[in-house]
Amino acid sequence: VQLQAFGGGSVQAGGSRRLSCVASGGTFSRYVMGWFRQAPGKEREFVAAISRDSSSTYLRDPVKGRFTISRDDAKNTVYLQMSSLKPEDTAVYYCVASGASSWSRTLQLPSQYHYWGQGTQVTVSS
C-alpha cells in the first residue's frame, strides 16, 4: 500500500487545517488508518487512528476535542481535521496503515503500522 499525504502548510495559532491521505495499491477498507507526527528534536508520536468500519476512533489526549479523524473508503482517503491549532502542533504529519486484526490501545505504537506515507509539514505560528 502506498500512502500520500496532502494538506500541510503554515497556519496561525487558533486556525484550522485538514490533512488528507490517499492510499493506493491495496484494499483500503482492510486497514486501520492513522496519523503520527514528529516535531523537530522529538520522537515520533501517535496522533489518531480509525477502525476499518469507522465505528471507532482513538486520539492522543492533547488533541482530543481539537482533532478529528475520518475516512472515506470510496475515495481511499483518510482525513485529519485539525482545529484550534497550537504552536506545539508543529510537526511533520505521517499517514499510516495497519493490517492489525484487533482494535486496541496498542494501535498507538509505531510498530503496529506496516505502511507509512512520506509526511507533510504543518507549521503553526503564534
Image: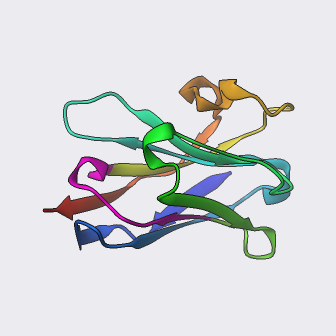
Left/right of residue 91 with respect to residue 21 in the rendered view: left
> Quarter-wise, where is residue 11 in the image?
bottom left
Left/right of residue 29 with respect to residue 115 in the rendered view: right
Residue pictured at 26% horizontal, 30% vertical? 42
Q: Give the extent of the magenta segment.
A: 79-91
| Quadrant where the C terminus is found in the figure | bottom left
Q: How many marks?
A: 0
- Point out residue 101 in the picture as x, y percentages from the top left corner: 86, 32
Residue nearest the observer in this picture, 28 or 50: 50
Residue pictured at 52% horizontal, 39% vertical? 60
Given the current orientation, which residue lies at the most extreme front position?
Answer: 65
Given the current orientation, which residue lies at the most extreme left position?
Answer: 126
Residue pictured at 42% horizontal, 67% vertical? 83
Residue pictured at 78% horizontal, 55% vertical? 26
- Point out residue 24 in the picture as x, y percentages from the top left corner: 69, 62
Left/right of residue 51 with respect to residue 21 in the rendered view: right
Residue nearest the observer in this picture, 121 or 125: 125
Colour scheme employed for the rendering of this structure: rainbow
Left/right of residue 87 with respect to residue 93 in the rendered view: left
- Point out residue 115 in the picture as x, y percentages from the top left corner: 61, 42
Residue 83 covered by magenta stretch: yes
- Point out residue 8 in the picture as x, y percentages from the top left corner: 35, 67
Residue 15 covered by magenta stretch: no
> Quarter-wise, where is residue 86 in the image?
bottom left
